[in-house]
Amino acid sequence: MIQKLATSEYELHDILKQRWSPRAFSNDAIRPDILWSVLEAARWSPSGGNQQPWRFIVTQKGEEAYENLLGILTGNNLKWAGQAPVLILTVAKLVSDSGRPNRHAYYDLGQAVAHLTVQAGVHGVYVHQMGGYDQDKARELFDVPEGFDTVTVLALGYGGDVTSLPEDLQERELLPRVRKPFAEFVYADKFGTPLQLDVTAPDSTGIR
Amino acid sequence: MIQKLATSEYELHDILKQRWSPRAFSNDAIRPDILWSVLEAARWSPSGGNQQPWRFIVTQKGEEAYENLLGILTGNNLKWAGQAPVLILTVAKLVSDSGRPNRHAYYDLGQAVAHLTVQAGVHGVYVHQMGGYDQDKARELFDVPEGFDTVTVLALGYGGDVTSLPEDLQERELLPRVRKPFAEFVYADKFGTPLQLDVTAPDSTGIR
């Protein structure tokens, strides 16, 4: 399996450093206890008013539901996602229990998926999230009711052989991970003003 | 500091198990290298098309920006958030670089905050996310431009003494963490059909 460590400037936990979104997956299935473990992580994620506005439709290779979900992916996703043993359709509940629109539904779902991804990393399982799929067909195929949005499809599995991918994707698979510099997204005082914060001696008084 | 471990049925990494959202924070400041470390975790979070649609306005106790952010919190948040040494306003970029609406902006921001929270846990720093604040005032105070939404305010700090809180909040601080049962949010085949998946022996052929 290719390692694509985050080239972080500051301390980053190994699970976060090693996480990336591969396209090559092995044929190995994911054990049920491990699948429940990653869903457990999503379950204990925080959410506004503890509304837990996340739903997961879990499909495994060999099931009709898996084939259905695979079939509505678009673009490059179609070329590789069928290698993954598990595909999950994520769903956000748009209205809170009080009946008011929940403007944090997508945000909270994203957090739950991130927690799931971290726990997957504990087990050596990789997660590749996809936004490219047919939303209307997803709603129809999986009976997703009004008041809920399908949001992403997650591919889960163990790392595979990059040569199992079509050539154009092999190239992409080997590209380094890149991110914006801090100055472009971490601000102080006002939007757009980069945070200036020197890393000083760790033993300053009153600071730990 | 009160421990409020997740009462998980399946394996859950200690960082996720120990994470919760306290209201009591100690007076200790957060060291700059630790603050950068948690922002680094947000930075390396995944996002649709690697758009990284997250922005963070970081304020620290003693700064005018901190007082401004504290002042626009609503409800109970006003009673406790001023104990935290760091308050961060999170912002989502609603339009992708191609100029099209990014429907995963909130979702990706949520993931970045979750990664930040996990890295905070590595350092023993707690994060309490708030949705209750005045959005219009936030935009005005921090010059947040059109095309961006402010989404949450994060309080970061070390655990504090529960008796430092007003009495009604002391009670809430001691309540156990609760979550929906799996059957209410993990489905198979169709929306609403609980996933049935027995935890079988870990040594089944072809499964690891």
Image: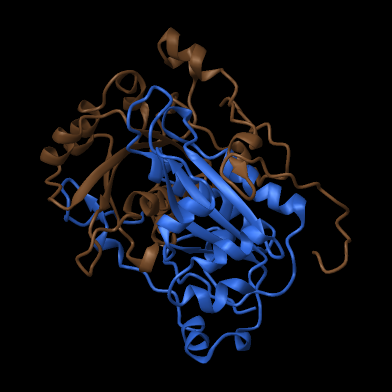
Chain colours: A blue, B brown
Quarter residue A181 falls in? bottom left
Quarter residue A131 falls in? bottom left
Question: Farthest top residue?
Answer: B167
Residue B46, above or below B69: below
Q: Is residue A202 visible?
A: no
Is A68 on the left or on the right of B89, as rendered? right
Residue A198, above or below A173: above
Q: Residue at x 65, y 36 (%)?
A: B183
Number of numbered discs on residues? 0
Image quarter in which the N terminus of chain B is found:
top right
Percent across and percent down for residue B97 are: 23, 68
Residue B47, above or below A205: below
Q: Residue at x 69, y 60 (%)?
A: A63
Percent across and percent down for residue A203 are: 44, 47
Image quarter in which the C terminus of chain B is found:
bottom right
Q: Is residue B156 visible?
A: yes
Percent across and percent down for residue B185 are: 58, 39
Percent across and percent down for residue B77 are: 33, 23
Q: Residue at x 80, y 46 (%)?
A: B198
